[in-house]
């Protein structure tokens, strides 16, 4: 399926979930992340700052700041850089309404051990679709060598995505693990 149709479909699907379900799913994902061996062994963790309808990372960032170094993305035109933050107070609304760092300590891609990646959809090969600006693929191509961990709700799974030459697949995707 092409990325444009996937984006449209997934944006519609996620509107159908109610707050209680979102909250339950987010809690499950949160617990899986903090018990993950790569999370536990990482020193410097890069994490997106969630928008509404994405897997929530605000509690995760807050918790991670107690135990690890944390950096978060900031967009500059067509590219994205990561800046280390010390607290959630170091964030301010920026590009695309995303909370972005107001700090100045830019992190090099080689220094990040674990990257927690947002997505709109993922497929059987762990390819992802995002909002369509290619920020993450460009970042992965710029020398990032750490682990790539996507966070998603299981309804964001799609069998197959039409990928292009720049697409990287993720190392792993965590979804909610709830008995229904
Ligand atoms: N939380 C988060 N931060 C991120 C990303 C992301 O996907 N999620 N990005 C990944 O590359 C970069 C920002 N890229 C973005 C590119 C486009 C849109 C966008 O089109 N937003 C829509 C609607 C957002 C919504 O559903 O609320 C818009 O502004 O109309 C958002 C982020 C870096 N930070
Ligand atoms: N390393 C790269 N160099 C040049 N162009 C790139 C690179 N990576 C991606 N692009 C281009 O960026 C555009 C958007 O890519 P894509 O549709 O895969 O975005 P996305 O993964 O959904 O978005 P995002 O990573 O921002 O969440 C495409 O035209 C793609 O070819």
Image: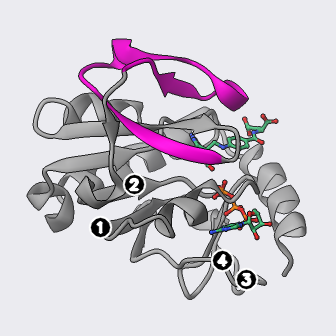
The residue to which callout 4 is attached is 166
Q: Do the residues labelled 2 and 4 touch (CB within 8 Å)?
A: no
Mark 2 beta carbon near ligand 1 (under 8 Å): no
Contact, CB < 8 Å: mark 4 with mark 1?
A: no
Magenta span: 79-103
The residue that disc 2 covers is 116
Q: Distance between the residues labelled 1 and 2?
A: 10 Å
Q: Which residue is drawn at 58% across and 62% down?
A: 138
Disc 4, SS: loop
Label 2: few (<14), some or many (≥20) within 10 Å?
Answer: many
Q: Mark 2 or mark 3, which is nearer the start of the sequence?
A: 2
Task: Give me the residue at 59% from left, 33% from top.
Answer: 19
Image coordinates of residue 153 in percent, x first then y, are: 55, 59
Residue identifier under label 3 = 163
Q: Mark 4: is the Cβ under 8 angstroms from ligand 2?
A: yes
Q: Distance between the residues labelled 4 and 3?
A: 8 Å
Relative horizontal placement of residue 52, taking residue 2 as reference (left or right): left
Tell me the mark number nearer the camera, choosing from 4 and 3.
Answer: 4
Disc 4 and disc 1: Cα gap in Å? 18 Å
Is residue 179 among the parts visible in the rendering?
A: no
Left or right, 74 with respect to 101, comes to right
């Amino acid at each position: 399926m092409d990325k444009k149709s996937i984006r449209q479909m997934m944006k519609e699907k996620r509107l159908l979930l109610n707050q209680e379900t979102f909250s339950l799913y987010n809690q499950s994902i949160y617990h899986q992340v903090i018990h993950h061996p790569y999370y536990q062994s990482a020193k410097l963790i890069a994490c997106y700052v969630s928008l509404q309808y994405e897997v929530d990372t605000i509690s995760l960032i807050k918790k991670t700041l107690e135990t690890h170094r944390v950096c978060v993305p900031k967009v500059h035109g067509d590219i994205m850089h990561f800046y280390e933050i010390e607290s959630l107070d170091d964030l301010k609304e920026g590009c695309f309404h995303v909370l972005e760092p107001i700090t100045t300590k830019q992190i090099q891609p080689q220094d990040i051990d674990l990257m927690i990646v947002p997505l709109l959809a993922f497929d059987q090969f762990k390819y992802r679709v995002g909002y369509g600006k290619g920020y993450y693929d460009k970042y992965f191509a710029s020398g990032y060598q750490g682990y790539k961990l996507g966070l998603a709700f299981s309804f964001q799974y799609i069998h197959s995505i039409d990928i292009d030459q720049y697409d990287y697949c993720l190392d792993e995707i965590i979804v909610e693990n709830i008995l229904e």
